[in-house]
């Protein structure tokens, strides 16, 4: 199972302002992704920016997402950081063996991304996803 840092998600009430800040200060470019939106899911404004190696996903804060999706963890309240894996099932087994609870969002926001979220010991939210799912 391979793991690689993929992105940092930052949440804001004003995504265009946040995007302009990061683009102009750090000279970041765009990433083009196909999003998946469900009737009860997240339809907020998101901008995807990158320096060519690391991505930032700048999203509208949604404090009620976890309730609507019936999950304990809300990745769009305070933001999160993300690792990409090539074997999400093996990673889920690792969390279960370590008795680390997680929210299995499946494929809900990004086309082809199977996403899970969990907390580190200090309450920071971590996403792990696999593409092609």
Image (cartoon, helix red, strand yellow):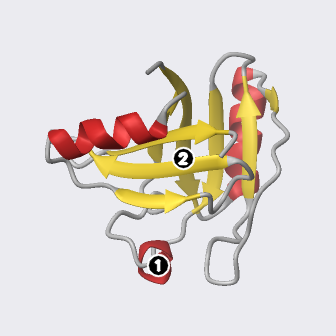
In the figure, is residue 117 to the left or right of 102? right
Q: Nearer the viewer, residue 121 or 20?
A: 121
Q: Residue at x 82, y 51 (%)?
A: 34
Please say whether residue 27 is visible from this viewpoint.
yes
- Quadrant assignment, res 109: bottom right
The circle drawn on residue 53 is: none
Residue at point 67%, 16% (across, down)? 53
**Viewer-nearest of discs 2 and 1:** 1
Residue 62 locus on image (x, y percent):
53, 70
Q: Which numbered disc flags the more N-terminal residue, 2 or 1?
A: 2
Q: Pinpoint residue 120: horizontal percent, then vertical percent.
A: 23, 41
The quadrant of the picture occupied by the N terminus is: top left
In the image, residue 101 lies at what x, y percent? 23, 54
Q: Which residue is mark 2?
A: 10
Q: Position of residue 115 (x, y in %)?
A: 52, 50
Which mark is on residue 64? 1
The answer to whether residue 81 shows anywhere in this view is no
Depth order, front residue of 54/10: 54
Residue sitting at x 81%, y 44%: 33
């Amino acid at each position: 199972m391979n793991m690689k840092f993929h992105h940092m998600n930052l949440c804001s009430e004003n995504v265009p302002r946040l995007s302009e800040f990061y683009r102009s200060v750090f000279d970041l470019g765009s990433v083009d992704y196909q999003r998946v939106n469900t009737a009860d899911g997240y339809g907020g404004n998101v901008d995807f920016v990158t320096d060519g190696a690391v991505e930032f996903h700048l999203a509208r804060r949604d404090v009620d997402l976890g309730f609507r999706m019936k999950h304990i963890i809300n990745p769009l309240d305070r933001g999160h950081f993300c690792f990409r894996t090539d074997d999400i099932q093996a990673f889920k087994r690792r969390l279960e063996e370590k008795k680390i609870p997680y929210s299995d969002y499946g494929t809900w926001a990004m086309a082809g991304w199977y996403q899970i979220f969990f907390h580190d010991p200090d309450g920071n939210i971590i996403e792990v996803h696999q593409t092609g799912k």
